[in-house]
Amino acid sequence: MNLDEATIRALRARQVNHVLAQLAGDSGRAALATNLRAGWRAVLDARVGEILDVKAVVAAIESVIDGPLLDSAIRPAARAAVLIELARLREDDTTLGAYVPAGARAQLHELLARPGLLPEKFVREALTHRAFEQVMRDVLDGALAEFQVKANPMTAEWGLPSILKKAGPFGFGLGAFAASFEAVRGELDKKLEPQRKIFLQSFARRALSTMAEFVIKRHDEPAFVDLRKELLDWLLGQPVRELVATVDQKSGELGESAASAAAAHVLRMEASRHRRRAAIEMAVAAHGRQTVREAMAGYGVDATEVDWDALATAAWPAVSRALATPEARRWVDDMLGGFWDELLVPGGKEALPSNAPDPRDP
């Protein structure tokens, strides 16, 4: 059957319109779920070495990390999500424990009871820090001063000063001695104060070091385990808004900015790049002959039960918009055009562009 050029053009346009209408309609949405399900099943049954190209995967990952997407899209999106969530949490009256089920709480208790949980270097570094040293000096200074006032028999009201007062007019010369004693005590206090400060300067440091060793030595004992569990229970019992009350807008912005910058820096470090590539190469070397399903099962992962209907429904608004673009129309036309080109020009040497109207037009 010989067809003239006008007929071929019309048939080509009608076929493109029909295919686009099918793709963008309800049948297309159903086909998307069906094809996703079948495609994923095919991926699971394929061998890891057949679908995982180390060079291509590494290049794709590095293109995201080094390209503008990370800084212009991913980081701003993460920043917005964090700040919005912080604002919501500052108004959340629910206790933190409401977000932790009983099973998870039991596992946290079990975790806190594990031996060797407390890092020794961190304990020493924290407790012997100059900030704690200053606190310890102030506490000990107050304790010594109070002891001097209340417990030293030479200076306390219940000691020698009390005896001198009780002697009264019958003390025969004790009054003069009492006055002299008060003067001497004042001088001693003046001389003892700087000496006390010097003593505390070194003793506070030794006391904190002793405390750190004590904590390290005994942190796995029942009392310390109970302390960790009770602190956890206290934390879970607090309203969320109180826990984040000190994290204002500026604090949230600074924290998010620092975390994002650190994450981007780590991702772009040469050592991180080597580790990523090595991990992918090791995965192919270890599982290349296995199917994806078998490789995932080795790690306890079962991804066979996926609700592709729900995913297709959620993605469909975006997919349908993409199918309505001029680029999608040209793609369909290019796929179908070869057949019609061969009818019009034997051998298909010359392409026949389509001027078909948009399938959404009446």
Image (spheres, rainbow, N blue to C red):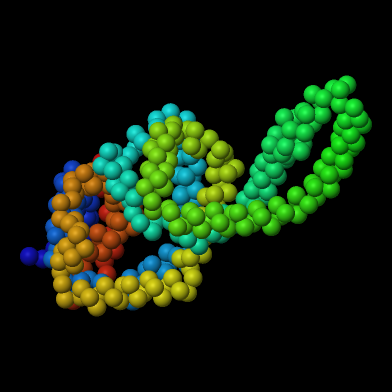
31 or 166, which lies in front? 166
Residue at the image position 39 percent from the left and 53 percent from the top: 220
Taking the image as drawn, is residue 260 in sight? no
Which image quadrant: the C terminus? top left
Q: Is residue 278 left or right of residue 139?
A: left
Residue 71: image location, x then y, percent: 50, 58
In the image, is residue 274 above or below residue 174? below
In the image, is residue 306 above or below residue 270? above
138 or 179, which lies in front? 179
Image quadrant of residue 189? top right
Residue at the image position 25 percent from the left and 59 percent from the top: 332
Which image quadrant: the N terminus? bottom left
Residue at the image position 30 percent from the left and 48 percent from the top: 110
Give the residue furthest to the left: 1
Taking the image as drawn, is residue 329 in sight? yes
Residue at the image position 29 percent from the left and 75 percent from the top: 282
In the image, is residue 201 above or below residue 52? above
Residue 294: image location, x then y, percent: 15, 66
Residue 281: image location, x then y, percent: 30, 76
Q: Is residue 124 left or right of residue 330?
A: right
